């Protein structure tokens, strides 16, 4: 079941935020107006986890923002955070699924909910950003129908520990 976040379930937002394996890196290539990519497996995979976030009331109160939470019974197993972006797309600011439930369709159901929300708000599609080292997420976005719209090799350059490029993905309606 997917529910829109309210004050009553706001505390569940970080529950599906778990570490994930980094097993490869994608290498985008732009040629003749088309982005493609190849993937290279890492010789030594590692685990990565994003910090928990304090989710503001704006995602409950403002029409141009939303969070949807995926539940099975009382357990929150997934989340997707959206906002209307200045360019007419819905920005997927975050999507996450509990580690034990990945690759079981929850991410696709959350993305379907994002599509529905964006269409209700008369937006042109979805957009998001992820890192080139998150090959599993990149593969998910590509399978869902997203295409690469650009690469930014400076976005993470201020972080000495980050050897990452930002990949911007688009899903146009």
Image (cartoon, helix red, strand yellow):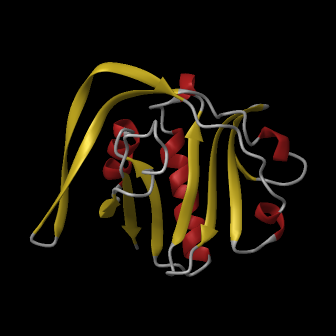
Q: State the image coordinates of residue 150 (x, y, percent, origin top left).
A: 31, 65
Quadrant hosting residue 96: top right
**In the image: residue 89, left or right of residue 41:** right
Is residue 1 visible in the rendered structure shown here?
Answer: no
The residue at the point 74 percent across, 43 percent down is 13
> Which residue is most to the right?
8
The residue at the point 20 percent across, 50 percent down is 37
**In the image: residue 116, left or right of residue 56:** left
Quadrant in the picture for the N terminus: top right
**In the image: residue 17, left or right of residue 45:** right
User: Is 125 drawn above or below residue 54 in the view shown?
Assistant: below
**In the image: residue 122, left or right of residue 30:** right
The residue at the point 76 percent across, 62 percent down is 59
User: Is 48 drawn above or below residue 172 in the view shown?
Assistant: above
Q: State the image coordinates of residue 104 (x, y, percent, origin top left).
A: 48, 32
Quadrant in the picture for the C terminus: bottom left
> Which residue is most to the left?
32
The residue at the point 70 percent across, 56 percent down is 67
Q: State the image coordinates of residue 44 (x, y, percent, origin top left).
A: 31, 18
């Amino acid at each position: 079941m997917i529910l829109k976040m309210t004050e009553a379930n706001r505390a569940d937002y970080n529950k599906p935020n778990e570490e994930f394996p980094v097993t490869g890196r994608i290498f985008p290539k732009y040629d003749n107006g088309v982005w493609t990519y190849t993937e290279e497996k890492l010789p030594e995979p590692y685990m990565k986890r994003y910090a928990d976030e304090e989710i503001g009331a704006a995602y409950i109160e403002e029409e141009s923002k939303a969070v949807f939470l995926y539940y099975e019974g009382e357990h929150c197993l997934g989340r997707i955070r959206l906002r209307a972006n200045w360019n007419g797309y819905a920005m997927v600011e975050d999507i996450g699924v509990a580690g034990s439930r990945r690759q079981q369709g929850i991410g696709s159901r959350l993305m379907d909910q994002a599509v529905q929300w964006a269409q209700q708000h008369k937006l042109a599609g979805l957009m998001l950003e992820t890192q080139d080292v998150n090959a599993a997420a990149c593969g998910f976005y590509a399978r869902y129908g997203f295409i690469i719209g650009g690469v930014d090799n400076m976005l993470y350059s201020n972080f000495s520990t980050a050897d990452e490029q930002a990949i911007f993905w688009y899903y146009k309606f």
